[in-house]
Image (cartoon, rainbow, N blue to C red):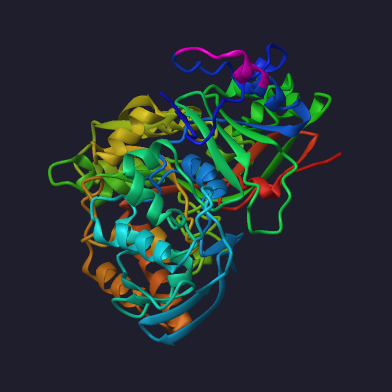
């Protein structure tokens, strides 16, 4: 399916000389084109030097900002939609808001910047903010509902001022409204045209506007000429190409088909660095790779000693050194440096003792070994299938026979979102909120899903207190204690904080971000 911006009379096409860079031809509209349309398209063709092409490992999944939890999707959304605030490597910066103040523990007042326009020309006002947040807080079926249901109401004062009321004191409110899913939606456009029309032809107020989405192939954006921010785009067109295979993505980088390639495997780094005109750029991310263990009654992983045996069987450092060439840090927590509530005792730390792992299995009644189902994605994370296979081998050495099922990411995501974790599941989780509240919320019994069936009364108590605790130091200590409990009880076996590796063309200026976003205004030309 190809989605197209309805207001465009024609579609920008790729010339035969640059098909590789654009990723193929766009299907013609029914009825063909007349001579006038053809001449317009030729006039709008974008030269290579004015097009930025990004090679992604997976496609985005939706333009519903509230119904996904997917970094590849947000890497597109962040350029189309503006947020009230934005995270810059853990620092919260104002974006749409010009001023804010705390009225009381449960009331915050905000003032919007004036003159901000949506891509259809409508002005962004307080009613759009109210519409956006009320949608997600009132619909519990949306993926992002639990990240925003702390908000009880957005009260409009006038076109540019509004209150946000919370159910309880909310120390992390600014973190919440600067994260994934908090882009501001156009109320009038959606109510007039309908939600389905918005999903086909989304508009925001961000620096780039939507042109088309050809599923499993590419997303195309153009700069928004009336963008309110101090930004003059060096790019006439931005193309996100979907290239699942690492080797193909690297080849496209080396031959000029893409300017930026995500998740370049360490085995290709020398090849990229030695190639004229390309180089490797690496940086820390907020993503932690981990195993989710199912505690459901009757499963082997219900047993604490079996979970510990899994933990002690895995050599975290070998994973990062042998497969990732050092591009990872062993961890026993998901709250990494730069996040509120970080526990340094659990960072750059792991437990590896295969002999003790065997003892634990024997004590649990599995002296002859144990059989487990193990689901993992391939093509989504850096060297993910290699890591899963190495983990499978490590487990086998102590008598844990993990039946590894490698899945394309879309299939894996269906299992993950459908709570179909049989015993073990391997994935990476990021933290766009930069706060322990987001990283630890799944350990509360009321938030828990059938992926783990984990419950702990002390964890529930600590999470509930920390969520509304306006004392920063005490709140941090509460989250640190939760991490210590979880590290021992093992609903998750944490593996490593992932470093991201990108292949870039020398003609662009790009620096990796901690939140893994690809924010186009930060990508310039080097010439």
Q: Quadrant of residue 409?
A: top left
Start-end of magenta stretch? 31-39
Q: Position of residue 129 (x, y in %)?
A: 42, 64
**Image quadrant in which the N terminus is located:** top left
Q: Is residue 492 among the parts visible in the rendering?
A: no
Q: Residue furthest bottom?
A: 104
Q: Quadrant of residue 503?
A: top right
Question: Left or right: 446 with respect to 95?
Answer: left
> Does the magenta-highlighted stretch encompass residue 32?
yes
> Does the magenta-highlighted stretch encompass residue 293?
no
| Vertical side of 320 occupied by 401: above or below | above
Q: Position of residue 408 (x, y in %)?
A: 40, 25
Q: Position of residue 72 (x, y in %)?
A: 50, 40
Residue at 28% across / 34% down in the picture? 415
| Vertical side of 203 occupied by 152: above or below | below
Q: Position of residue 105 (x, y in %)?
A: 38, 85
Residue at 62% across / 48% down in the picture? 519
**Image quadrant in which the C terminus is located:** top right
Which sits in the foreground, 499 or 21? 21
Q: Quadrant of residue 520?
A: top right
Residue at 43% across / 70% down in the picture? 480
Q: Is residue 335 among the parts visible in the rendering?
A: yes
Picture mark count: 0
Which sits in the foreground, 28 or 15? 28
| Vertical side of 53 occupied by 525: above or below | below
Question: Left or right: 40 with respect to 350?
Answer: right
Question: Left or right: 372 with respect to 338?
Answer: left
Q: Residue furthest right?
A: 527
């Amino acid at each position: 399916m190809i989605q197209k911006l309805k207001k465009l009379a024609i579609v920008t096409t790729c010339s035969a000389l640059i098909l590789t860079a654009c990723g193929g031809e766009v299907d013609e509209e029914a009825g063909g084109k007349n001579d006038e349309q053809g001449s317009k398209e030729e006039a709008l063709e974008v030269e290579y030097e004015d097009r930025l092409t990004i090679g992604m490992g997976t496609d985005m999944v939706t333009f519903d900002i509230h119904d996904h939890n997917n970094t590849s999707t947000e890497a597109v959304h962040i350029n189309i939609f503006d947020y009230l605030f934005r995270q810059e490597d853990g620092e919260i910066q104002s974006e749409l808001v010009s001023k804010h103040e705390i009225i009381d523990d449960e009331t915050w007042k905000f003032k919007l910047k004036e003159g901000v326009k949506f891509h259809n020309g409508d002005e962004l006002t307080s009613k759009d903010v109210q519409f956006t947040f009320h949608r997600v807080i009132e619909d519990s079926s949306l993926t992002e509902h639990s990240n925003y249901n702390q908000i009880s109401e957005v009260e409009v004062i006038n076109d540019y001022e509004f209150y946000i009321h919370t159910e309880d004191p909310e120390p992390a409110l600014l973190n919440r409204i600067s994260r994934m899913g908090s882009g501001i939606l156009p109320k009038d456009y959606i109510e007039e045209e309908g939600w389905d029309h918005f999903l086909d032809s989304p508009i925001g107020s961000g620096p780039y506007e939507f042109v088309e989405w050809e599923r499993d192939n590419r997303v195309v954006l153009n700069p928004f000429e009336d963008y309110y921010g101090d930004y003059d785009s060096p790019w006439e067109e931005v193309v996100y190409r979907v290239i699942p295979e690492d080797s193909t993505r690297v080849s496209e980088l080396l031959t000029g088909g893409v300017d930026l390639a995500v998740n370049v495997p360490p085995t290709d780094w020398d090849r990229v660095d030695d190639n004229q005109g390309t180089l490797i750029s690496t940086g820390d991310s907020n993503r932690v790779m981990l195993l989710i263990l199912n505690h459901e009654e009757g499963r082997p992983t219900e047993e604490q000693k079996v979970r510990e045996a899994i933990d002690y069987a895995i050599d975290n450092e070998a994973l990062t050194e042998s497969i990732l060439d050092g591009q990872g840090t062993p961890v026993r927590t998901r709250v990494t440096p730069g996040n509120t509530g970080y526990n340094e005792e659990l960072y750059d730390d792991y437990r590896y003792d295969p002999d003790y792992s065997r003892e634990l299995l024997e004590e649990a009644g599995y002296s002859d070994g144990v059989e487990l189902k193990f689901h993992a994605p391939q093509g989504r994370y850096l060297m993910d299938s290699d890591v899963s296979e190495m983990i499978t081998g490590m487990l086998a050495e102590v008598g844990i026979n993990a039946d590894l099922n490698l899945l394309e990411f879309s299939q894996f995501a269906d299992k993950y979102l459908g709570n179909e974790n049989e015993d073990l599941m391997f994935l990476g989780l990021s933290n766009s909120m930069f706060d322990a509240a987001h990283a630890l919320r799944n350990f509360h019994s009321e938030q828990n899903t059938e992926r783990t069936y984990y419950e702990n009364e002390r964890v529930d108590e600590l999470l509930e207190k920390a969520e509304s605790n306006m004392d920063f130091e005490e709140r941090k200590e509460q989250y640190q204690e939760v991490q210590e409990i979880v590290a021992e009880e093992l609903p998750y076996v944490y593996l490593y904080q992932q470093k991201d590796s990108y292949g870039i063309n020398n003609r662009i200026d790009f620096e990796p971000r901690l939140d893994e976003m690809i924010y186009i205004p930060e990508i310039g030309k080097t010439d």
